[in-house]
């Protein structure tokens, strides 16, 4: 985690009631360049038809321009290119492909929000969290059922339940 995000995470942990303002102003060139390393470069181009390889040729200029637009609040979300991809059973599944710069910005915002809000989450919560997932929840629950005070668990299929209520 970059130093700037570590600082924000520490502030969020120390000052629980602090309200972070102007999140777009917290996105800087260094942070965006670090996010660029983790972008899937082979992913399909968005509506602008600019590939990651083309964007990378002038990466410093593109990121500098993006940060300037963010500072001046001139940056707006771009359209998402739509494509239909068949599922395993043959039914179409709509897929959205954002532009390369949009993907970069989404990753940077996600990391910023994660650094701030991760401090408020309980360690025993697993949904949509970094470095933990459903299998970790199952492992923890299995241990609790075997060695803890709980003697039972409930499994439910919510989707099928909702299908029967309508």
Image: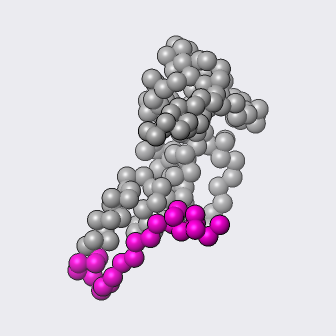
Q: Is residue 36 above or below residue 120?
A: above
Position of 151 relative to 28 (above/below): below
Colour logic: one colour
Q: Residue at x 52, y 24 (%)?
A: 44
Where, quadrant-wise, is the C terminus in this rendering? bottom right
Examine the rendering and report whether any part of residue 77 can be seen.
yes
x then y, percent, for residue 1: 43, 44
Q: How many marks?
A: 0
The spot of residue 73 in percent (x, y) is: 76, 36
Write the residue at 69% across / 47% down. 22
Identified at 47% across, 50% down, the residue is 6
Residue 135 in picture, x, y percent from top left:
33, 58
The answer to whether residue 37 is left or right of residue 76 is left
Q: Quadrant of residue 12?
A: bottom right
Locate residue 64 relative to residue 88 in the image: left or right.
right
Residue 8: tell me if it is visible: no
| Nearer the observer, 34 or 96 | 96
Near-viewer residue (18 or 147): 147
Q: Choose top left, top right, bottom left or bottom right for residue 18.
A: bottom right
Q: Residue at x 54, y 58 (%)?
A: 117
- Left or right, 152 with respect to 12, comes to left
Please state the horizontal and vertical placement of residue 70, each as a whole percent of the image. 69, 34
Vertical order, 23 against 82 (above or below): below
Please state which of residues 25 and 150 is positioned toward the viewer in this rendering. Answer: 150
Q: Which residues are magenta?
A: 144-166
> Is residue 113 one of those drawn in magenta?
no
**Per the image, is 164 magenta?**
yes
In screen coordinates, is 147 left or right of 36? left
């Amino acid at each position: 985690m970059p130093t700037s995000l570590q600082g924000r995470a520490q502030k969020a942990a120390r000052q629980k009631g602090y309200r972070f303002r102007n999140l777009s102003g917290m996105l800087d060139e260094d942070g965006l360049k670090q996010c660029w390393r983790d972008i899937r470069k082979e992913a399909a181009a968005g509506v602008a038809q600019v590939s990651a390889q083309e964007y990378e040729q002038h990466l410093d200029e593109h990121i500098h321009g993006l940060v300037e637009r963010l500072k001046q609040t001139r940056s707006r979300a771009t359209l998402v290119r739509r494509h239909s991809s068949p599922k395993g059973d043959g039914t179409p599944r709509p897929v959205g492909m954002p532009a390369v710069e949009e993907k970069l910005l989404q990753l940077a915002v996600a990391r910023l929000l994660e650094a701030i809000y991760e401090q408020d989450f309980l360690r025993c919560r697993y949904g949509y969290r970094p470095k933990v997932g459903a299998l970790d929840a199952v492992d923890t629950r299995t241990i609790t059922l075997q060695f803890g005070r709980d003697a039972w668990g409930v499994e439910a299929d919510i989707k099928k339940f909702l299908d029967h209520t309508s």
